[in-house]
Amino acid sequence: MTDIEIQQVGGVLRLTINREDKRNALSVPVMQGMLDAVRGVADGVRVVVVASAGERIFCAGADLAVMAAEATGLEQHEGRGLLAKLVVAMRECPVPVVARVQGMCLAGGTGLAMGCDVVLARESAAFGLPEIDRGLWPFMVSALLARHVSPKHAMDRMLTGDRFDAKTAYEMGMVSRVFPDETFDADVEAYVANLADSPPAAIRLGKAAWVAATETPSLPVALEAMQAQLSLLTTTKDVAEGIAAFFQKRPPQWTGR
């Protein structure tokens, strides 16, 4: 049994952190395994799901044992950089990356979740940035917080380390949807299945355009880029199929072309 389980069923690629006894902490092998999997997404993959073993903890953040190891400072620094590389890889991934947060999501685990395109949380899940309690600061996670929540909310959470529930995380902009505990598994599977059945060409071009737009400070430049992407998408066979299916009142058959 490995610390990271990678399984593809149909168009869904699942990356499961399997370190329940270590609170699903982010070790170097876990981050490297996820990074390699995201970078190597095959043509048949339509959605990537980031999950973890057990019910209580999604991810407790970085493995603090790494910081106390005998590795040199440079080696530890490079190890921590894997999370940054993973987040960038998830943004550059041509398919949606969905975080399945079933339990506690702390510190770097919060960064892992926010690095995904969509965060689906169980109602009883909880979030927190407890680094301050250990004399640390969520430096890398702060870069993601700045892109998701207001400065006042972000600073409050980083300064206090207080935990907060999934509903609060949703209201802050850290979570996409909150599902009831009783139907969480079914709701997540239905959501993922819907993404897997979506038109792949539109998803691929749309996600790339969205990422580019969010990183473009000038609105006119962003709008011009979006116009170009729309024109490009309308040349695909999927768009022709989608329109034909609409008028023929039948389900569309996507080919990704």
Image (cartoon, grey):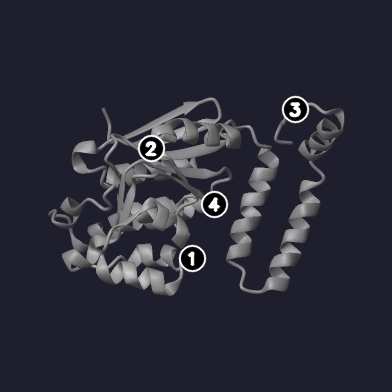
Instruction: Of the two numbered discs 1 and 2 on the same chain, state the one appearing first in sequence.
Output: 1
Residue 108, picture quadrant: bottom left
Dot 3: what SS?
loop
Of residue 127 and residue 132, the one placed in the foreground of this image is 127
Q: Position of residue 20 (x, y in %)?
A: 23, 37
Circle nearer the viewer, 3 or 4: 3
Tell me where residue 72 appears, x and y as whole percent: 18, 59
Residue denoted by label 3: 251
What's the residue at 69%, 67% (across, down)?
A: 222
Image mark for residue 181: 2
173 or 209: nearer the viewer: 173
Q: CA distance from mark 4 to mark 2?
A: 31 Å
Secondary structure type for disc 2? helix
Q: Position of residue 51 (x, y in %)?
A: 38, 39
- Find disc 4 in the rendering and name its residue: 92
Q: Are marks 3 and 1 in contact (CB under 8 Å)?
A: no
- Comparing labels 1 and 2, the label whose residue is closer to the camera: 2
Q: CA distance from mark 4 to mark 1?
A: 16 Å
Q: Secondary structure at mark 1?
A: loop
Horizontally, residue 99 falls left or right of residue 42, namely: left
Between marks 2 and 3 in the image, the one whose residue lies nearer the viewer: 2
Amino acid type of the residue tagged 4 in the rendering = Glu
Q: Which of the 4 image quarters holds residue 18?
A: top left
**Mark 4 near mark 2, Cβ–Cβ under 8 Å?**
no
Type of amino acid at the residue the image marks with label 3: Pro
Q: Which residue is mark 1?
A: 147
Earlier in the chain: of badge 3 and badge 1, it is 1
Q: Say whether disc 3 or disc 4 marks the residue closer to the N-terminus.
A: 4
